[in-house]
Amino acid sequence: MRAIQFDRYGAPSVLVCREIDRPACGPRDVLVRVRAAGTNPKDCLVRKGKFRWFTGRRFPMGLGHDFSGTVAAVGRQVAAFQVEDAVFGMTNGWQGRAYADYLTVRPSETALKPSPLEFTAAAAVPLAAQTALQALRDLGGLSGNQRVLINGSSGGVGTFAVQVARILGARVTAVCSGRNADLVHDLGAHRVIDYTREEIRHLGASFDVFFDVFGNCRFPDIRAVLKPNGRFISTVPGVPVMRWSILSRLSSGPRAHLVIVKSKTGDLQTLGRWIEEGRLVPVVDRVYPLADAQEAHAYIETKRARGKVVLQIA
């Protein structure tokens, strides 16, 4: 089978499409024939070696966590899925393998694909939409009539975050560039701020949740726009956000959190139900064939993608 691998950390040019053995389906596994794989900034950071303390130095390495496809085989201990089921999901951990013709996953990371979606659109959902859901619902405790600001609202996670926040009943202020304002407004934002024209820290408003998807905000600078019990949530791991998270728990006032997404069948089913109800729509910017993974990564790193970038595999 074909798979994208790399033999050293580096630029997109290290990615190579090569033939490897098809993975074996273990007793607790589901073997998926991958039809499409979502790409994410996490994949680019792994490729660069930014998380080598998790990924190690054992090469060659694969990439990719988001997938959609059809079940090719099920382990003898798996009862939730059958051969030919259309599924989507996200592999947990740091060993990405979804940029390939076949992939083994655990049933707990997988769900039946929402019927309205083609495989390409379905592959855009799992990591980004679950990140938005788990950040806003679980860490932010977002509910009806609360106010949320989403910084970086036109990217993969951001486009889902705007919609998830609306579904949860919140008032949404979205921050993006002016060229993406119409897109974000159409997704449900009540107010759209062009960051090139207005400074977030000077909004003079109090938010229940500040979701920093873009990762360019500092918690000490954002405290002024948060309510006393507000939540600052970041998607970017690192020492600063961990320090802010710990220190904010030692005193009263707003708190900082880092969202660490985990694929869960229940959350995938929730997202799937919203998609089938027409309340949640994935935004796909570009689709590349598997062999063009280098170009897909190069485009992601421009940070100008509107929604998700997907690899079409089968």
Image: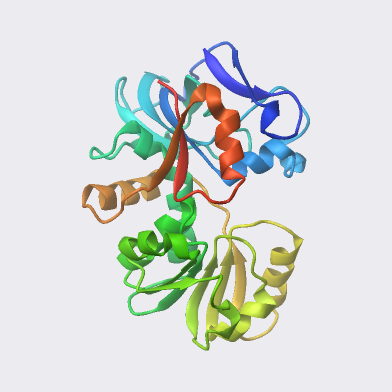
* Residue 76 falls left or right of residue 48: left
| Among the 4 quarters of the image, the one containing residue 113 | top left
- Give 300 or 182, whichever is nearer the viewer: 182
* Residue 249 falls left or right of residue 203: right
Looking at the picture, the colour scheme in use is rainbow
Residue 60 visible, this orientation: yes
**256, above or below 108, in the image:** below
- Say which residue appears at 54% left-offset and 26% top-offset: 292
- Give 148 or 291, whichever is nearer the viewer: 291
Q: Where does the image place residue 266, in percent across and percent down from the top left?
A: 37, 48
Question: In the displayed image of the protein, which residue is found farthest to the left?
Answer: 277
- Give 56 or 40, whichever is nearer the viewer: 40
| Among the 4 quarters of the image, the one containing residue 59 | top right
- Say which residue appears at 52% left-offset and 48% top-offset: 262
- Say which residue appears at 62% left-offset and 71% top-offset: 256
**312, above or below 284, in the image:** above
Residue 97 visible, this orientation: no
Image quarter in which the C terminus is found: top left
